[in-house]
Image (cartoon, rainbow, N blue to C red):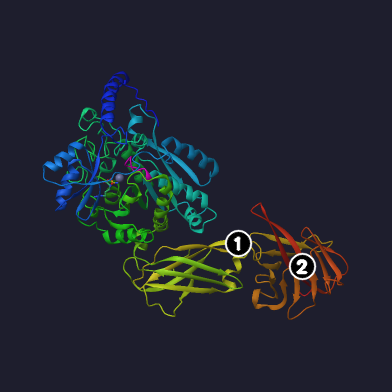
Amino acid sequence: MRQQTRGHERERVLHQALVVGLVMLFLILATSSPLQTASPEYQLVRLEFKHRSQLQKWVNSGLDVWHVEDQTALVAVSANQLLALESKGLAPQFVPRPAVASFPACYRTYDEMLDLVNVWKSQYPDLFHWHDVGDTWEKKQGQADHDLYVARLTSLRGPDDKPKLFIVAEHHARELITPETALYFIDDLLRNYGDDATITWLLDSREIWVMPMANPDGYTKAAQAENWRKNTHETDTCLRGAPPNSYGVDLNRNYGHEWGNDDGSSNDPCNLTYRGDAPFSEPETRALRDLIQAENFDLLISLHSWGDEVLFPWAYTWRPAPDAERLNALATRMVALNGYTAKQASGTGYLASGDTADWSYGELGIPSFTFEIGGMEDGFFWPPCDIKEQLYQEVRPALIYAALAADRPYQVAGGPEAHQLQLNVADSISIRAQVSDVWTGRDMIESAELFLGALADPGDGIALMPGDGECNYPSEWMAAELESSDYARFLGRRIPIFVVAKDSTGQRGVPAVAWLDLRDRGILNSQSIQLWMPGSDDPRFEIKGSYVYRGADVLMTLSDGRVYRGRGTTGALLYTVDGNRLRAGQNGPVLYSTRDDSIYEGTPEDGVLLYRVERDQVLYAVSLEDEVVLSANVDLAIDDMKLVRLLVATLIDGRY
Ligand code: 0X9
Ligand code: ZN
């Protein structure tokens, strides 16, 4: 628990606290509640409504509606509210309250978030950037020292001007799983950069901005086991009002698009959905507004809980947004793998005006979404420790999809994408992907393309073919077998590969990304090895990538273990490199190399020593034939760390 320091009126508050404390002690002793929260006691009830206007009236009046399902609302009510409802002839059905309505110990507090940030700063200085973008209400008052921070995650690689995804969590204080989800996502991206193909490519090609706590003042109250929703902007009426301690502005009603509608927000400072006295009256929403405007985000997600939903604008009206179809298509793809429901925000049953997504979409045109993480069975606003990571894992595919879609959200919205990308790297390399347009549209798959190394323009990739011979379904397995010429230039490297699919309406979905790992084949493109002949000042041979050069002439290729005379695989096959040995090909003498870096002519046992290789240098040993094959074991340092032992065969032939 953290203690808040209140600078002004400390004495008076202490006095009041003493009186309030005695009253509360009495109340706690008088009730048999296992909970000892400072927030007003509540009961959870189900209320049936006949028409949505009735539900809207409840929300507007300040009832704490947690969720709506069909014609039933799940509502947290105080004793007085319960009496008032019953007096109107309603019959609330009691629902067991959450087992853990407090702050689970495994949840990170504001200060613990800052500790974590220090670790990330030192471990990932090239990927993790932490920006202070404003103060909270309490900081402006000279109370708690809380800032609004945003993480910017991107690698040093890729273009300067990368598409940007913005994720903001915890407008609502008690929605504890949302900062956790944001922190898990940051950690996931940092930890898996370099290992996971999709994440590596995303940080190379995107900026992912994450604000884990948009309401640290409120969160600090929530961390004291309080059922707190709003920020902590104090107003005198509500400090003394009924219910007590109901002050604060609902930050998700304080944004400036259709702000002030009485349906969907309240002008009563004690109401749970109090919108503030003007749009952006709160420092938290002002900081967010300024950040969102300055950074020109391409896609925005506001994390809330709970409901197992991905919501898109509008929230303030029942009417659909101009881009409803494409927003729905994006939301539907985000939930494709996790069982959440995609719907318009007001489709949750009630209107909410002045929320983040309505503003960022309505005023700035950013495709914007509200996630409602978790469900009733997950502990309402207080998911227990043992499932919080699982809740993140459920949301993860949606966040990854959003990051993939950030470069052209509306264009990929209706397109098909691959949800499986499988590689088989053996003697040959084959690739299979299941591409689907079943999420919305259900158009036939028309084609799919494979890109190696980098995503290029449509049409420039390698065509994948339908496994069943024909593209005639909205979901197809597509496959390709690579030619060695497709990947020869990537030998010795691990590269990302991409599959992009197109449907019969011409829409292309997001790419699927995987690694193609050719690190144990050939040598690095960036590496070059030079071999000298004894007594010579100039290197006789130079080996780059999988090819052996002498000057500008290509002598042979090693790309597939075979040695050719002439250009690449179009030359005449001379030898086959087999493990540590050279075997005869169509032409040439039989020569053997051994592990002591010596080259023999004849059998390994009784061959005649021809050459010895030391540190890339070919040392003359016995005799110089007119035409011999040398092999050298060359140590290459890769990434400063690993040593690769490489068999390099070179041809010394006076005719070249
Ligand atoms: O009411 C809200 O601000 C959000 N729900 S929450 O339980 N996290 O507080 C968003 C509600 C979605 N919008 C509408 N119902 N219109
Ligand atoms: Zn919320």
Circles 2, 1 touching at the beta carbon (< 8 Å): no
Q: Which residue is mark 1?
A: 493
Q: Give the residue at x 21% y 46%.
A: 258
Front residue (pair 390, 621)? 390
What is the three-letter code of the residue carrying label 1? Arg
Residue 191, given in percent of the width and then of the height, sits at: 52, 49
Quarter of the figure with residue 470: bottom left
Front residue (pair 286, 594)? 594
What is the three-letter code of the residue carrying label 2? Ser
Residue 365, given in percent of the width and then of the height, sits at: 30, 53
How dense is the environment of label 2, judged by Cα within 10 Å: few (below 14), some, or many (20 and up)?
A: many
Mark carried by residue 76: none
Quarter of the figure with residue 218: top left
Front residue (pair 352, 576)? 352
Q: Give the residues drawn in magenta, as a range.
A: 169-177
The quadrant of the picture occupied by the N terminus is top left
Q: Which residue is mark 2?
A: 631
How dense is the environment of label 1, judged by Cα within 10 Å: few (below 14), some, or many (20 and up)?
A: many
Residue 634, given in percent of the width and then of the height, sits at: 74, 61
Q: Is residue 413 magenta?
A: no
